[in-house]
Each structure stands twice: as C-alpha cells, then as structure tokens.
Image (cartoon, rainbow, N blue to C red):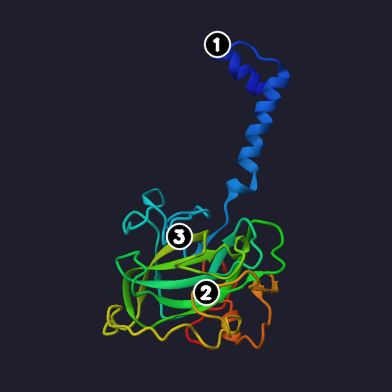
Amino acid sequence: MLSLLIKRGQMMGQPAAPAASWAVKAVALVLLVCSPTALAHSRFAYPPPRSTESGIKTGPCGTAAHKAGQFTGIPITNLKPGPLTVVIEETIAHTGAPWRIQLTQENTDSSDGVCVLLDHLPQPTNPGTMPARFYITIDIPDIACKLCTLQLANPMTDKESASCTDPGTCGSVYHSCAVVNIEGKAANTRAAYQCPGVPTDFTPATGKVANTYNKNENAPYEDGWLKDYQGLPAKYLRRCKNPELPAGEQCTAAA
C-alpha cells in the first residue's frame, strides 16, 4: 500500500517525498478510517433505517444529509400489528446508556404526540466485540399508520455526572429512524389512537421515570438478547422472524 501511494504521487507530478513521510501520511489515513470515532455509535438495523449512519446526534432523525423528513426514495417497511423483533446495531459501547423506541404520527418525524413503545432498554454489561447487534421484541399497535416513523434514541448517560432527560438535558444523544406502514384495522387511525403508555411489565424500566435516564442502566445479554432480568416476560425475548433474524419464528400474536 505504501509503495502504491508513493508511485501515485510521482505520477501526478508531485516531487517524490521520503518514504518515511509517506509512511506517516499512510498510517494517519488508516487511523482516521479505522478509529472508533469514525465508526460512531448505534442505529436501527431492522427495520431498515433511512440512514445507515450510527452517529446521528441531531434529533429526532438527523438532518437533510440523513434524509430526515423524507418519505420517498427510502426504505419503507410494511408491518403487521403484534410482536416485532427490532435489531439495534451498536458500533461503540457506552456503559449504562439506554435506548428508547417510539412511534410518530403519520407522515412526520416530529416527536409531538409520539407513542413510546419501549423505554429504558438497558445497555449490555457484556457488549463484546464491536460492532454488535442486540435484539428486543416490541408490540406494534393494531392501527392503520401510513408513513409513520419508528424512532430510536440512545442518551449518552455515561457522559453525564447525574441523571438527565431526553428530550431535555442529556448533552449527547444518538438517533436512528425507520419509516414504516402499520397494516392494522383501518378504523383505528393513528391520529385517533390513544397511546397506552410505556409497558408496565418491562422490568428494566421498573422504578424509573419516563424520559429520565441515569448512567447505570445495564443488564446482562446473551447472544444479543437480554437475559432473564427481574422476571422480564418472555414476550420480549421472542425471536420473531425478520430479514435480520431469519431463523426466528413467525410471530403473529403476543405471548
């Protein structure tokens, strides 16, 4: 690789530099491409997100560069109501930094009127080699929701000296968004849907305040799944088949 870089410079009419100089530049380039900061942090792997970047810090869905607010020319996933295994890909582990998953109104990325489908999904205590994928099965409501956005938020609580809120005081939050069509009962429109609130049986959130996060939200995982956590119901651990989890079962109803 080094010799190719030297030859390329000579072919472009640049004076030949000492090999040591080219070596320094080549090493610097490799470090830039391969450094953890270049890899970023976390994103949806399924449903497929608008942007595959995992370092989006502008909420709730990034900027125009990340196709925020765009509902054409992007991946759109058709979903049935009921259990759905979502896949989160993490590229840099942040101890104690949890995730939240929420659903918008139709044809918008706005966080106004969102339904929080899951909150305080803990960070693995044993994340393993990065990048890594983690799985959780959520319940998709029985509604008709055309061009709605599933939003993933990952507050960096490990950077905070105390608890923080999101939206609010958390200084750094990573975001990922996936556009979906939910094919539920036509009479159950998204606009009329009354969100039931955060599931009370999701035990990692027990005793925690919605949208308020601290730096010790960790739990053990095994093969990318939460291990039994304070009596966590089995429905959250159902391996519902999707393109990122082809060996899973065909889940059609909540356990």
Q: Of marks 1 and 2, which one's residue comes earlier in the chain?
A: 1
Q: Residues under labels 3 and 1: Cα distance?
A: 44 Å
* Quarter of the image where the N terminus is located: top right
Q: Which amino acid does label 1 sit on?
A: Gly
Residue at the spot 65% in from the left edge and 88% down from the top edge:
231
Q: Of marks 3 and 1, which one's residue comes earlier in the chain?
A: 1
Q: What residue type is labelled 3?
A: Pro
Q: Regarding mark 3 in the picture, which secondary structure is present there?
A: loop
The residue singled out by tag 3 in the image is: 49
Disc sitting over residue 29 in the figure: none
* Quarter of the image where the C terminus is located: bottom right
The mark closer to the camera, 1 or 2, is 2
Residue 58 percent across, percent down from the top left: 44, 56
Query: Is residue 45 depicted above or below 138 in this figure?
Result: above
The residue singled out by tag 2 in the image is: 212
The mark closer to the camera, 2 or 3, is 2
The residue singled out by tag 1 in the image is: 13
